[in-house]
Amino acid sequence: MNQTVFSYGDDSPEHSKISHSRLPCGAVQLIGRESELALLDNALAEPLIHIVQLVAWGGVGKTALAADWMARLAANGWCWESDGYQNAAPDNGASDNIARIRRAQHYFDWSFHGQGARDQGSASSDTFIAAALEFFGDPDPQFGSPHERGTRLARLIARQPAVLILDGVESLQYGDDGPLAGQLKDPALLALLKGLAYRITQFPGSGGLCLVTTRTALTDLDVFQYRTVIRHDLEHLDRTASAALLHQAGAVRCGAAAIVPDNAELQRASREVMDHALTLKLLGGYLQRAHGGDIDRRDRVRLDKADQSIQGAHAFLVIAAYERWLGGSLWDRLAGLGARLVRFLLPTVPRLQSLGFLNDAANRQRMVAILRLLGLFDRPAT
């Protein structure tokens, strides 16, 4: 007879250490990512999986997914059910499925957005490594070379059930062009991730997971793929989920009539922006604020002018519509905001030079101001 027996082990709540999250707030209700949430839950439950990397262009929803998964884990008391094993009973031949409830003894996250453009060589993990070493109990976070510090951090993390989220590491990688594409330029972060990937040889069964989001797959981890590392390419939302997100963001009418989330016009609008999550959120917010949520008024955005070959190009057209609606006088009261966040939306491909208005610093600054005004980002724009 098979039965499930739960063992809680030695993971004690009073010994848990949970860091304040640095991830930006996600949606009130995450839409269309049920399979990805299940993938993360399953990876956390599987002791042999140490790292999951989510790979996608900017604006597809990597950070929102990571933040939502973290919030769900927190709501569950930082507990998860680890995969069981079979325990044969010699007297009657029956076996029990032993399932262990694990609790994260440590939780820590870090967002690398705003660390600098990767093509400028200004990005570094130094601040993160020092903060993480201190958090995980290292007596001297500044001691040692970058490689030594990263290796030391991996050992500290691997000693107990821990959850680590690293958001937006693309600024620390080589770009998409050239023989080094996807490789990490930062020796400390490289040592950390490699150390976590093969930690099973030193700390078997410690549990936990490192979740990494990036625009470019981490090629340094290819050798661990499907062993201790999972790479998941995050696709655009499906059409029904896209329409629901657009409705959630504010597009709730078609003319004078109220509409439901799977409305056909919402689905047509979603197709027009190629189901790009950030664009859908921007568009819904614009229609709600400027046109009472009327999806028929999306023609004011001129979506047909977007270059279909550029990822997220529709988002800039929505931002331009916001600017026309708000008027230029607003920007005198929003002086001082930097333009770094705009790069979050920009795929690093030469075709972006065709968006000539982005080459002007004042135009970029206006767009950052709009994004901050709408509350789409809560990280500093400096």
Image: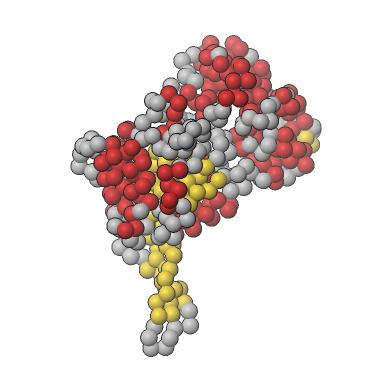
Q: Is residue 101 above or below residue 122?
A: below
Type of colouring = secondary structure
For the C terminus, the image quarter is top left
Q: What residue is rendered at 61% in x and 25% in y?
A: 351
Q: Is residue 355 left or right of residue 154?
A: right
Q: Is residue 42 above or below residue 21?
A: below
Q: How many marks?
A: 0
Is residue 105 visible to us here? no
Q: Is residue 352 left or right of residue 117?
A: right
Query: Residue 256, located in which quarter of the rendered image?
Result: top right
Query: Residue 219, located in which quarter of the rendered image?
Result: top left
Q: Is residue 212 above or below residue 173?
A: below
Q: Is residue 84 left or right of residue 317?
A: left
Residue 126 appears at what percent x and percent y? Answer: 32, 33
Q: What residue is rendered at 74% in x and 27% in y?
A: 304
Residue 93 appears at what percent x and percent y? Answer: 43, 86
Residue 368 appears at what percent x and percent y? Answer: 53, 22
Choose between 311 and 164: the one closer to the eye.
311
Residue 47 appears at what percent x and percent y? Answer: 40, 60
Choose between 330 and 198: the one closer to the eye.
198
Query: Residue 289, located in which quarter of the rendered image?
Result: top right
Choose between 305 and 17: the one closer to the eye.
305
Is residue 181 visible to us here? yes
Q: What residue is rendered at 46% in x and 38% in y?
A: 182
Q: What residue is rendered at 25% in x and 36% in y?
A: 145
Query: Farthest front residue?
Result: 179
